[in-house]
Amino acid sequence: MPKLIVSIDGVVIKEVRLSKERTTLGRRPYNDVVIDNLAVSGEHAVLHMIGGDVYIEDLHSTNGTYINGSPVKKQMLAHQDLVEVGKYKIRFLARGGVGDGEVAGTVAGAGAPNGSPSDSVPLSVAPTAQMPLGGNAGAATLRVLSGAGAGREVALSKVVTTIGKPGLAVAAVTRRLQGYVVAPIDGDTLLNGEPLGADAVALQDGDMLELGGTRMQFVFS
């Protein structure tokens, strides 16, 4: 089954399998693929699946739709094509192969892409010196300390976990060989009370994350 791997600044934030004949993409919450960013139009583009082929069509968006760096109005997608909308990059995998990362569940207190309540929180993982070279990451979790999901613990078992609420604050926790890192995607994210910059930062056991009014503790054992 074809799928899309959505990323920004090298951090994968979601994975979408294409199972419908028509899949819409845009900033508005009623789209099938919601990208909550002002550079993306409310109804930006649509993907048509006809037999085994997938076509993407720009819906007269303000900033345009690009494939492998070239602007397009309507074009059939080939395996590994890179679609760009705003600052977001969307890798098309015709055979549903594995992308640069996976999307993990969200933690309670964060909102779903359409702004409705959700039991998930988006995160991204980065490397940390606590992990042995060549080994696998230990048992890392996020402990939710405030909000609707207070008291819950979420295992960081995916390569990439996104946390937060689109429109307020979203970050990504990524697992690498050396450990875990966190990187902001949209809005303000605090790490131990200090705003995160543009670059990914290694997480240490006990670090505190805060975004969208929800506080979480990174636990690495």
Image (spheres, rainbow, N blue to C red):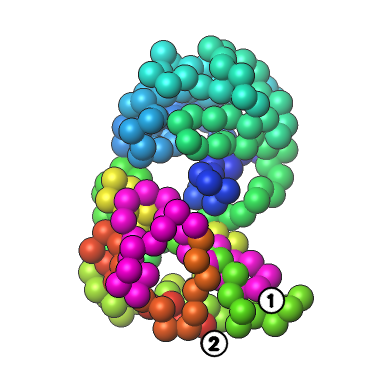
Amino acid type at circle 2 is Ser
Q: Secondary structure at mark 2?
A: loop
Q: Where residue 220 appears, x then y in whole percent?
A: 51, 82
Q: Where residue 170 appears, x then y in whole percent?
A: 37, 54
Q: Which residues make up the magenta segment? A: 172-199
Quarter of the C terminus within the rendering: bottom right
Q: Is residue 183 magenta?
A: yes
Quarter of the N terminus within the rendering: top right
Q: Is residue 178 magenta?
A: yes
Mark 2 or mark 1, earlier in chain: 1
Q: Give the residue pinned by disc 1.
A: 136
Left-right relation of 207 to 18: left
Q: Is residue 152 above or below residue 37?
A: below
Q: Quadrant of residue 213?
A: bottom left
Local crowd size for mark 1, using a 10 Å CA cut-off: few (<14), some (14–19), many (≥20): few
Q: Residue at x 52, y 78 (%)?
A: 140
Q: Residue at x 54, y 51 (%)?
A: 11
Q: Which mark is residue 221?
A: 2
Q: Residue furthest bottom?
A: 221
Amino acid type at circle 1 is Asn
Residue 157 visible in the displayed image: no
Secondary structure mainly formed by the magenta segment: strand
Q: Where residue 35 appears, x then y in whole percent?
A: 40, 38
Residue 168 visible in the displayed image: yes
Q: Secondary structure at mark 1?
A: loop
Q: Residue at x 41, y 78 (%)?
A: 207
Q: Where residue 181 appears, x then y in whole percent?
A: 53, 67
Q: CA distance from mark 2 to mark 1?
A: 12 Å
